[in-house]
Image (cartoon, rainbow, N blue to C red):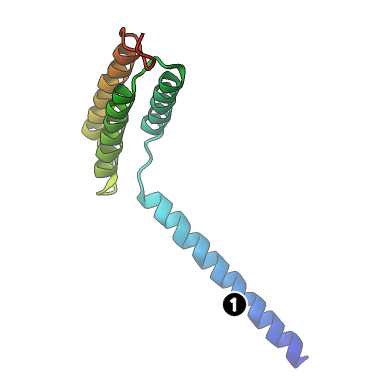
Amino acid sequence: MNAAATMIRKLQGSLIGTALLGLIASSAQAQTPATPRVDQRQAHQQARIAQGAASGALTAQETQRLERGQAAVQNAEAQAKADGTVTQQERRHLHRMQERKSAAIHRAKHNDKTATGQ
């Protein structure tokens, strides 16, 4: 009986520990504001750059410049999230940055420069 009681206490302790870890993890997620549209668009633009580099539509220099532009958007997003809230003004700023970066990707992919130098 004593061994069974010890096992039950250990099980209860482990369940309580697991519940606490889950609570901590969910509160940490709740503190980080979500920006799903920004993240989705960021991934799409990264894919466009990768496709352009793979097809030869982008030169190495163009690819590097566009990657730096995407990194700037990511940094701006991190700064917007730093205080725990992404305001409408910050969201508008991120969307404007992404519009400019999207246009830059389009221009670079459709200019006469290619990775093969033709």
The 10 Å Cα crowd at callout 1, few under 14, some 14 to 19, many 20 or more, is few
Residue 53 in the image: state x and y as whole percent. Answer: 41, 22
Q: Is residue 58 above or below residue 16?
A: above
Q: Where is residue 96 in the image (x, y as percent from the top left)?
A: 24, 23
Is 16 on the left or on the right of 63, as rendered?
right
Looking at the image, is 70 positioned above or below residue 15?
above
Q: In front: 5, or 90? A: 90
Q: Residue at x 39, y 29 (%)?
A: 37
Residue, disc 1: 13
In the image, what residue type sits under mark 1?
Answer: Gly
Q: Is residue 17 left or right of residue 24?
A: right
Q: Is mark 1 on a helix, strand or loop?
A: helix
- Give the percent coordinates (x, y) of residue 67: 32, 30
- Compared with 112, 34 (above or below) is below
- Residue at 64 percent across and 80 percent down: it is 10
Q: Quarter of the image holding residue 118?
A: top left
Quadrant containing the N terminus is: bottom right
Q: Looking at the image, which residue sits at the far bottom?
A: 2
In the displayed structure, would residue 63 be above or below residue 108? below
Which is nearer the eye, 38 or 28? 38
Q: Which residue lies furthest to the right in this view?
A: 1
Residue sitting nearer the eye, 46 or 33: 46
Residue at screen point 28% across, 22% down: 101
Q: Position of residue 25 (x, y in %)?
A: 46, 58
Residue ranking furthest to the front? 117
Query: Which quadrant of the view contains residue 46?
Result: top left
